[in-house]
């Protein structure tokens, strides 16, 4: 079944098609929820609530992006709402344009990196994951988190700075 | 912000593990998509008379509130009135005193335009066809119980015409409109009884 056929069947409330769509995307969506929430239980709740929203709102999908991209926005938004603590962390003003972050020439340990990401404050982690892992633009992140583009950029900088510090401790 | 060796971060991020959702997740979604018992059970429309009863009670409460306000206004204490009168007298005295001072005359003209509301009379005849049809059916069936209801309906129709004439002659007075609404409610009660028979 093509994606278009699958979406059409889901719109008719065909339960088998809905399960098929879930099977195709649940891994990617669950991982995204976990990256944002840093908690498997919370990620599970977000996934369930998010997929229900997807099926209930499927009539509003206009086909302007892929179904996967559309679903991810719905589910990521649900995960951010679940987090409830995603308010951006206030920092003292700093001219971060002049700051430098050096990730070193040696390879980063994936396991340490994941632990370090999970240790980030919720607001930093949300911005870092959405931009660096999920590939959203600052404008999209600003819309999702209801913040300005400038705030999104500075949050990303602070997230990276903190991540770098954490990783130094692990090494 | 300057970033050195960003490719190292990118490589590591690409290697981050992915996770499978727990098996129970789909069951929960499936449950959420299935209609609940409440969705499956039938729903019921209350009898038309229920709204009439509610409407009557609301009107009675409004009337009681209006009467209470009227009573309060009537029982305004004389001492208060005397105080108000004294204050007005004092202000008038000061005003007259100030007027005595010789000042150049300053004339201002104020005006205000208002749009008069259109003279419309509420249409109370929207349901008349149903009542006429009901009377025709009663006449055709000629059953004692229906005939009694028919007579009541005719009386109410006549009462309604009288009230309408008063409305046209004296304008839309609130108490007359209330009477008309009361008649309409009684007529719809009788109409419902006729339909049930």
Image (tube, coloured by chain):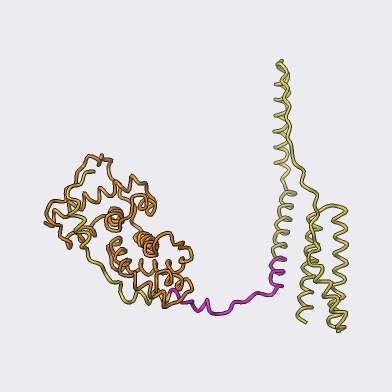
Chain colours: A orange, B yellow
Q: Where residue B2 sits: x, y (%)?
A: 21, 44
Residue at the image point whose x is 80% and y is 52% from the top = B120
Q: Where residue A40 sits: x, y (%)?
A: 28, 68
**Extreme front residue here?**
A2
Looking at the image, residue B145 lies above or below residue B159 = below
Left or right of A2 in this view: B57: right
Q: Nearer the viewer, residue A47 or A9?
A: A9
Left or right of B93 in this view: A102: left
Q: Where residue B150 sits: x, y (%)?
A: 85, 76
User: Which corner quadrant of the image does residue A70 belong to?
Assistant: bottom left
Q: Which residues are magenta?
A: B32-55
Quadrant in which the N terminus of chain B appears: top left
Confirm whether the magenta stretch covers residue A50.
no
Left or right of A83 in this view: A159: left
Looking at the image, residue B118 lies above or below residue A34 = above
Residue at the image point whose x is 85% and y is 59% from the top = B164
């Amino acid at each position: 079944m093509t994606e278009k056929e699958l979406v059409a069947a889901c719109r008719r409330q065909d339960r088998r098609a809905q399960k098929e769509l879930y099977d195709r995307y649940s891994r990617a969506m669950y991982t995204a929820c976990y990256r944002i929430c840093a908690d498997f239980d919370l990620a599970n709740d977000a996934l369930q609530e998010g997929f229900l929203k997807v099926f209930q709102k499927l009539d509003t999908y206009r086909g302007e992006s892929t179904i996967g991209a559309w679903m991810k926005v719905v589910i990521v938004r649900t995960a951010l709402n679940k987090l409830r603590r995603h308010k951006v962390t206030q920092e003292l003003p700093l001219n971060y344009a002049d700051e430098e972050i050096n990730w070193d020439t040696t390879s980063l340990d994936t396991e340490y990196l994941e632990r370090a990401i999970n240790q980030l404050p919720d607001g930093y982690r949300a911005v870092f994951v959405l931009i660096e892992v999920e590939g959203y633009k600052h404008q999209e992140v600003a819309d999702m988190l209801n913040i300005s583009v400038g705030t999104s950029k500075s949050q990303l900088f602070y997230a990276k700075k903190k991540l770098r510090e954490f990783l130094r401790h692990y090494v | 912000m300057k970033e050195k060796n960003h490719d190292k971060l990118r490589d590591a991020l690409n290697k981050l593990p992915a996770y499978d959702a727990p098996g129970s997740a789909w069951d929960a979604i499936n449950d959420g998509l299935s209609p609940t018992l409440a969705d499956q059970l039938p729903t019921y429309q209350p009898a038309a008379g229920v709204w009439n009863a509610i409407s009557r009670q609301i009107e009675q409460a409004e009337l009681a509130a209006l009467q209470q306000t009227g009573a309060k206004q009537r029982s305004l204490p004389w001492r208060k009135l005397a105080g108000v009168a004294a204050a007005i007298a004092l202000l008038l005295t000061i005003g007259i005193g100030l007027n005595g001072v010789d000042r150049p005359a300053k004339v201002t003209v104020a005006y205000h335009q208002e749009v008069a509301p259109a003279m419309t009379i509420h249409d109370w005849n929207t349901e008349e066809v149903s009542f006429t049809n009901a009377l025709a059916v009663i006449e055709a069936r000629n059953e004692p119980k229906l005939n009694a209801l028919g007579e009541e309906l005719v009386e109410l129709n006549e009462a309604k015409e009288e009230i309408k004439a008063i409305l046209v002659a004296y304008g839309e007075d609130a108490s007359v409109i209330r009477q008309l609404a009361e008649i309409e409610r009684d007529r719809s009660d009788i109409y419902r009884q006729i339909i049930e028979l």
